[in-house]
Image (cartoon, helix red, strand yellow):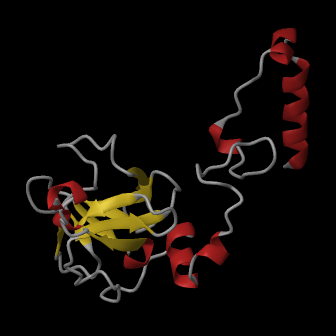
Amino acid sequence: MSRIVARLFEVVSRHATPRSVVLPRRIPVCIRPVSTSQGLQSLTRYNETTDWQKKLTPEQYVVTREKGTEVPFSGIYLKHSDVGMYHCVCCEAPVFSSEAKYDSGTGWPAFKEAHGTWEWDESLASIIRRPDNSLGSAGTEVLCKNCDSHLGHVFDDGPDPTGQRFCINSVALTFKPRENNKPDMDEQE
């Protein structure tokens, strides 16, 4: 088999035109390396010097950086009902509002929409969607737009008006309560 590949490479390289030496050729997708080795751009937009294993707990690391899933009905935010904002545990970007949270009965915190979504437009949201077949069928993974951390998955069986169910791992989130509406100093005078 290796002789066939070597012979094919020899034949193709003999017929290469001088133009192909000047202009870079496209590398077919099937043989493009997927790594962050020197010369290639990182797949994450977050600071490459961040040592995620030092910053995160082991469970947070497995879920957010290795695309794991926490055990159903075990997350700290499953029954959480305080008013505020849920942030990415890795970069603290606001990703979901408590106003969009609901009980889906699936074992993970569920949200109707991402923070920053306007009707169907998620361009201002702090999440991105990516096709994912790791669940055994075609699905959609939810990632933090800022640091590419895996947050969970989104399904099309949610409540109205969006019909979306964002199933998010609790360990991928931190919660910041909404501050009380305290009067400004000027109003007190």
In percent of width and height, residue 96 lies at: 29, 62
Q: Is residue 62 left or right of residue 134?
A: right
Whether residue 67 appears in this view of the structure is no
In percent of width and height, residue 158 lies at: 16, 63
* Image position of 119 with respect to 132: above or below: above
Q: How many badges with numbers are in the image? A: 0
Quadrant in the rendering for residue 58: bottom right
Whether residue 9 appears in this view of the structure is yes
Out of 102 and 177, give the one closest to the viewer.
177
Q: Is residue 13 left or right of residue 164?
A: right
Residue drawn at point x = 67 percent, y = 63 percent: 50
Residue drawn at point x = 22 percent, y = 68 percent: 98
Quadrant in the rendering for residue 135: bottom left
Out of 106 and 150, give the one closest to the viewer.
150
In percent of width and height, residue 147 lies at: 53, 56
In percent of width and height, residue 174 lies at: 40, 73
Residue drawn at point x = 56 percent, y = 75 percent: 61
Out of 179 and 125, give the one closest to the viewer.
179
The C terminus: image quadrant: bottom left
Residue found at the very far left of the displayed protein: 160
Q: Is residue 119 left or right of residue 72?
A: left
Residue found at the very far front of the displayed protein: 189
